[in-house]
Structures are given as C-alpha cells and as structure tokens.
Image: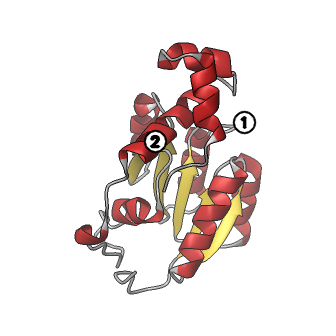
Amino acid sequence: MEGVELAYSILLVDDEDVFRQRLALAFHRRGFTVYEASDFDSAVGVLTESEPELALIDLRMPGRSGLELVAEAKRLRPEIKIVVLTGYGSIATASQAIKLGALYYLPKPADVDEILLAFSKDDDLSITVDQDELTPPSLARVEWEHIQRVLADCDGNISEAARRLNIHRRSLQRKLFKHAPS
C-alpha cells in the first residue's frame, strides 16, 4: 500500500492475542516498527523502554483500563499519537479518551487501513490513505463482526448472545462454526 512516506513505530495494545498479532503483521508489512502489549503494565514497559510515535489502544482490557493507559501514555510521552479501539457500546468511554489526548477512536474490530486513516487525520503525521483503496466489508463480514462483539460482551456465553441477537442458540452455533468471511 502506498501512502506511508515515513516508517513510524507503533505500539499495539490489545488483550486479544490473535487480533493484535494480525495487526502487528499487517503494520510490519507496511514498514512500521511494531511493539506489542497485552495489558496496561506491559504497555507502560514498552513506553518507557522504547519510543513509539504511535499507539493503538483497546479501551477494554483486564486489569487497568485502556482509558488509564491513554492518560499514562500521554504523561510519559506527550507527543505520542493515540488511536483507541472501542468495542460495541462504549462510545462514551471513547469520547473520554479523546478528552485525555487520543487522536481518534474506531469501533472494534478495525483493519489496518481504517487505523491508518484515523492516524492520517493528524496533520503532523506523514500518513496518507487513498480513500479509493478502502473497500467496504461484505455483509457477511459485518454480520460476523457484530456476532463476535455481542459474544464478547456476553463473555462467550452462547445462550445469552443468542438471546441478545434474537436468534436461536443452535443457529448462532452454526454461524460460529463457520470460518470468518473475508
């Protein structure tokens, strides 16, 4: 993908290992130096030992929240540019993160192009994203992501997620058995 004129370093903070690792690989392929952390403490460790210019922080993590991490990251490195990821239904918290110094927030899950587009809103960064390259997700992909968010909100309880989605439990299990659409 063209558009990133300078190679930046980015800290990815998310407790979902697979999601974080997929993002890390995608950023690495685009020339970024990538640091990963799964929680508040490991992220603070990266911030004190390294000097990432960008950070992508999930607001909902076990232990200390991403909101606390946004405040601490800005205290440790006032010049860091932060985009926050927010799960289903936590827009108010994301707004609070903006007040604490985050640049932007995105609903989770987000892909690398959406994240780069959020960072490109800061004029100090030399990141441009060709809007024509961004393709909207398929309807199947949007459904899959919504199901995953509701399931995460229900702490993996399929019966409760099915109730919230207003579908039969077995129908939800069949949908979950399928691989995520592209």
Callout 2, which amino acid? Ala
Please give the count of numbered marks on the rendered protein: 2
Percent x, y of residue 94:
44, 38
Q: Secondary structure at mark 1?
A: loop
Percent x, y of residue 129:
31, 72
Instruction: Identify the image quadrant of residue 131.
Output: bottom left
Residue 30: in sight, yes or no?
Answer: yes
Disc 1: which residue: 62
Percent x, y of residue 81:
45, 62
Disc 1, disc 2: CB below 8 Å?
no
Q: Is residue 89 above or below residue 128?
A: above
Residue drawn at x 50%, y 64% is 80
Disc 2: which residue: 97
Instruction: Identify the image quadrant of residue 46.
Output: bottom right
Residue 47: in sight, yes or no?
Answer: no
Q: Is residue 159 above or below residue 128?
A: above
Between circles 1 and 2, the one closer to the viewer is 1
Residue drawn at x 71%, y 57% is 37
Residue drawn at x 51%, y 51% is 181
Q: Is residue 28 above or below residue 68?
A: below
Distance in Å between CA atoms under marks 1 and 2: 17 Å
How many residues crowd mark 2 within 10 Å: few (<14), some (14–19), many (20+)?
A: many
Front one among 164 and 80: 164
- Quadrant of the snapshot with the N terminus: bottom left
Percent x, y of residue 83:
46, 54
Callout 1, which amino acid? Pro
